[in-house]
Amino acid sequence: MRTLLVSPPYCTPGEDIGSRSVDYSGNNPPLGILTLATYLRRHGFEVDIVDMFKYTSWEKIRETLNVAKYDIFGISIWTGNHFKAKKILEIVKEKKQNVITLAGGPHASVLYEQVARNYAVDYVIRGEGEDTMLELLEALKENQDVSRIAGLTYVKDGQLVNTREREPFSTLDDLPFTDFTDVDLNDYTEGLWSDTIIPEKLQKEYNIQYVKFAPVITSRGCPAKCTFCFKKFGNIRMRSAENVVNEIKQIYNQHNIKHIRFCDDTLNINEKRLQEICKLIIKENINITWDTSIRAYPLSMDTAQLMKESGCIKLSVGVETGSAKMMKSIKKGLTPEKVINAFEVCHKVGIPVIANIIVGLPGETRETIQETYQFLRTINPDYTLVSILLLYPKTEVYYHAKEVGFINDSYFLESEVVPVYCYEHTYEKLLDYSRKVFILNFVQQKNYKKILYYTLLRLRERIGHLTHIYLNARGFDLVLKDKRYIFEIKSGFSKIYKKGFNSIGYGNKNKI
């Protein structure tokens, strides 16, 4: 029984494969299916992996799936690639009807009944998949009853079957170190940094290079109860510091990597363990850099100093909002004082720190946006990333949106785009809010061209009855009465024309 595990293409939600140039920034090797394959191989199963993140045509996908040899096909589904995953499963079944198809991953684990009923899938694996999939493969191999296996959802004789819940994997040190031989880690180098992951200014200031890297996860679970995030497993389970550093050494020696990306939800939730990891990296003289996302609390000066000495070159902190009222309402367990302390510590130690902000949370107003703007001026992040609230299924904000009639589960059978929460504000208003916050990056950098660019974006909706603004990759063509002002980010207002232009080119070039 040969198994093929696939990670779907990486494309902007709503864009069909091949319809545009794809931005791969921030894309990591598919850690989930790599970990699963490593575990299954330990128990004697043959497993192949295909990461389709750079595939840009359905023809290539069909060719790959039709040529490959496999009896079991598994796919990892995230909210946002669920349409692509659905079509890939259909392609598999069209050509190879006898192949047994499996679906796992966050989206399948949350909307497991919807996926089981509407996708060309034989079994949905809910939650952590190692033991569930191992037991399933063993049962299929021996033609045994699968109803005894915990963590499965499937349709039998027209009836939906949900087996009992499986307990989360408790002893993470018993898991084998992830085998990365199925992927070329060089393929992901270009996605390590980008201007949206860490801005060019910081890359130059801290001499941060594009390097070969690998992802490592040191814990599972999260104790937080954030209203915008779905966490199936609340109890956090952690690997020992020795186990983590031994894996880093193995990856370092086998793959010649230069950088580690820790992918934990809460790497710093236990400061003592994080300090031990840092001390061991220093003691073992492992010549790497690393980055991660952390909570603002706990973070002491001693911990940050060790992080810096062990190679940390970037931290992302989930600030989400600068309003004390909103911070309490999202149940993240933070206060403004804790966030301020975290940023002060990072600044003193010299670790670049990025603030992640969510605009449009329930209860957001113009006043709370202004509070966020002023709060960012206080904590002074090296960069701010701003997102508009997306409704991921079975989060608290998603249930709220369902209660008010804004959305229902069938949405995900009709649209690939992760829905924006637009019940309280229009999408245009949320864009305006996000631009107000994002423009602070350029105010702090004194980048007047980009300040002007985002100011015009904010003005576009407000003065639309007086102007037309033609957006393009370089900037704007702004039409005000009988004049066109051409604005390019790199050169600013470079040309101004009178009447006689057209909407495609510059037309009659009568300079003023």
Image (spheres, rainbow, N blue to C red):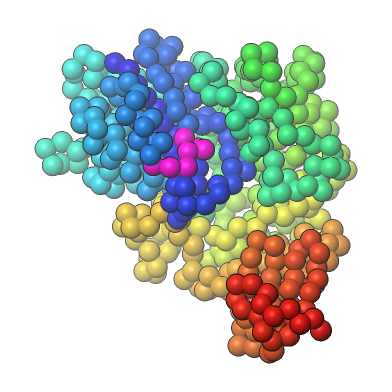
| Residue at point 58%, 39% (across, down) | 27
Question: Which segment is the magenta one?
Answer: 52-58
Q: Is residue 328 above or below residue 167?
A: below
User: Which quadrant of the view contains residue 107?
Assistant: top left
Tell me residue 436's x, y (percent): 70, 69
Q: Quadrant of the N terminus?
A: top left
Residue 437, can we see it?
no
Q: Is residue 42 left or right of residue 100?
A: right
Q: Is residue 37 left or right of residue 260?
A: left
Q: Nearer the viewer, residue 135 or 442?
A: 442
| Residue at point 65%, 61% (across, down) | 473
Callout count: 0
Q: Is residue 89 above or below residue 258?
A: below
Q: Residue furthest top?
A: 44
Q: Nearer the viewer, residue 45 or 188?
A: 188
Q: Residue furthest left?
A: 157
Residue 461, can we see it?
yes
Tell me residue 424's x, y (percent): 50, 73
> What main secondary structure does the magenta stretch of the protein show?
loop
Inspect the magenta stretch and tell me whether residue 56 lies in it.
yes
Tell me residue 174's x, y (percent): 51, 15
